[in-house]
Amino acid sequence: MRQLTVAILLVVAIALQSALRAVWQPLGFIDFALVLVVYFALQREPLLALITAAAAGLALDLISGPPALLGAGGFAKVLTAYAVYFVASRVMLDTTLLRIPVLVCASLIDNLVYVGMHRLLGQRPPMPFVQSLSYKLIATTVAGTILLYLYDSYFSGKARQRRQFTVRRRVARRPSAAARRR
């Protein structure tokens, strides 16, 4: 069941990324697949993060078309997932403020490896390096921070536990029938 959920999330992230590019070109710089990979790496699930990264990178390489080097995106996302997992396994990165630099570094690593693979194999990257780095870094960091914050606030295990305790506190605050009669 977990694998099906991950597959659906991955398909939605890739479809949303390609659809937003068609709606308005600057929205195409948001890398939803990278945000998903970073999320799984931060959850300290290395195998899931690496498989998701490889699938997302290859799918985005296939969608992006012929000028892109097939496999460069997958390799970049796998290295990024490993780097984020390596840091997350040694340092607690459970707050939103600590996830912002992680998203910045993940976007930086992903773009550096992607462009480096193109240059190493003699291919011309689809876009100038500084332009793609700056746009992707800003867009992915802002969108990823908002998405991870919303997930933590409404859908995570912590949020579920917070809602349960809120109900228990309401029940505990209600005056009992004996106290009302006095």
Image: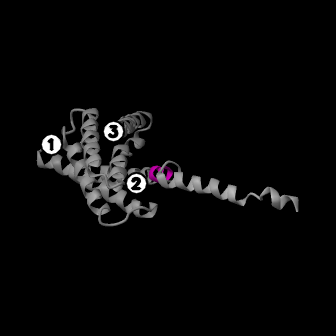
Amino acid at dot 2: Thr
Sequence-first disc among 1 and 2: 1
Hey, which residue is sitting farthest left in the picture? 121
**Would you place residue 10 above or below residue 131 in this image?**
above
Q: Nearer the viewer, mark 3 or mark 1?
A: 3
Q: How is the image coloured?
A: one colour
Quadrant of the image occupied by residue 100 = bottom left
Q: Nearer the viewer, residue 117 or 162?
A: 162
Label 3, secondary structure: give it: helix
Amino acid at dot 1: Gln
Amino acid at dot 3: Gln
Label 1, secondary structure: give it: loop
- Name the residue at 42% across, 51% down: 144
What segment is highlighted magenta in the picture?
Answer: 147-151
Asked whether 149 falls inside the magenta stretch, the response is yes
**Would you place residue 182 above or below residue 118 in this image?**
below
Q: Which residue is mark 3?
A: 3
Residue 54: mark: none
Give left or right: position of 53 versus 155: left
Query: Majority secondary structure of the magenta segment?
Result: helix
Q: CA distance from mark 1 to mark 2?
A: 27 Å
Residue 125 appears anywhere in the view = no
Label 2, secondary structure: give it: helix
Image spot of residue 119 (x, y percent): 15, 49
Dot 3 surroundings within 10 Å: few (below 14), some, or many (20 or more)?
A: few
Residue 123: mark: 1
**Would you place residue 91 above or below residue 106 in this image?**
below
